[in-house]
Amino acid sequence: MYMRFFTPFQLQERIAHERLSKICFIDYAREMIFVATRKHPKSGETEILATMRLTPDTDGDLEFGLLVSDKFQGQGLGKQLLQRAIDFAKREGYPSLFGVILPENTTMLHLAEELGFTMITLEDKSLVAVMTLS
């Protein structure tokens, strides 16, 4: 969670009704989300393994936010979801796709570079991965 949101989340913050409503009920006119799921091998319940949220900014560019469950990292889910985000952004005509990444999130930095993103360093030392699409 820290690598995605850049701050520790207390349980009460994670389960707050307003936050969960935003996650569960997507306004497709304003944002898109891709979700990787599987059936749990023992319980048969559907479980969420990873999410990719795409939100337009005020300049008309598309921001991505990727979260992969710890136990499913390193298996290609992040790459698949980021590739789908790129395809979606191109298809929908966004001029660029970007995401803010902490410098210590080396796995995400390498993935973004592998897929063709350019890194820009911000004043707070976080990085922005940017891909120009048009």
Image: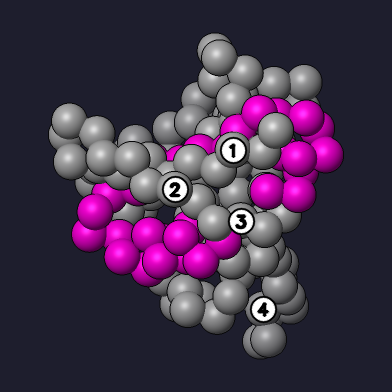
Q: Residue at x 55, y 43 (%)?
A: 131
Instruction: For label 4, count other residues whose C-alpha is less than 10 Å away and answer few (under 14), some (14-19) or many (20+).
Output: few
* Callout 1–callout 2 Cβ contact below 8 Å: yes
Label 3 vs label 2, nearer the camera: 2
Residue position for label 4: 40
Label 2 vs label 4, nearer the camera: 2
Could you say which is closer to the camera, residue 88 or residue 116? 116
Span of residues in magenta: 86-115
Q: Is residue 131 shown above or below 59?
A: below
Quarter of the image containing the C terminus?
Answer: top right
Residue position for label 3: 82
Residue lying at the far front of the rendered structure:
134
* Residue type beneath disc 1: Thr
Q: Is residue 126 shown above or below 47?
A: above
Q: Residue at x 73, y 75 (%)?
A: 39
Residue lying at the far top of the rendered structure:
58
Residue lying at the far right of the rendered structure:
91
Left or right side of 122 for 13:
right
Residue position for label 1: 132
Q: Position of residue 33 (x, y in %)?
A: 68, 42
Disc number placed over residue 55 in the picture, else none: none
* Residue type beneath disc 4: His
* Mark toward the start of the polypeptide (1 vs 3): 3
Residue position for label 2: 118
* Mark toward the start of the polypeptide (2 vs 4): 4
Left or right side of 14 for 111:
right
* Residue type beneath disc 3: Leu
* Callout 1–callout 3 Cβ contact below 8 Å: no
Q: Kindly report the distance in space between the C-alpha atoms of the residues bearing marks 1 and 4.
A: 38 Å
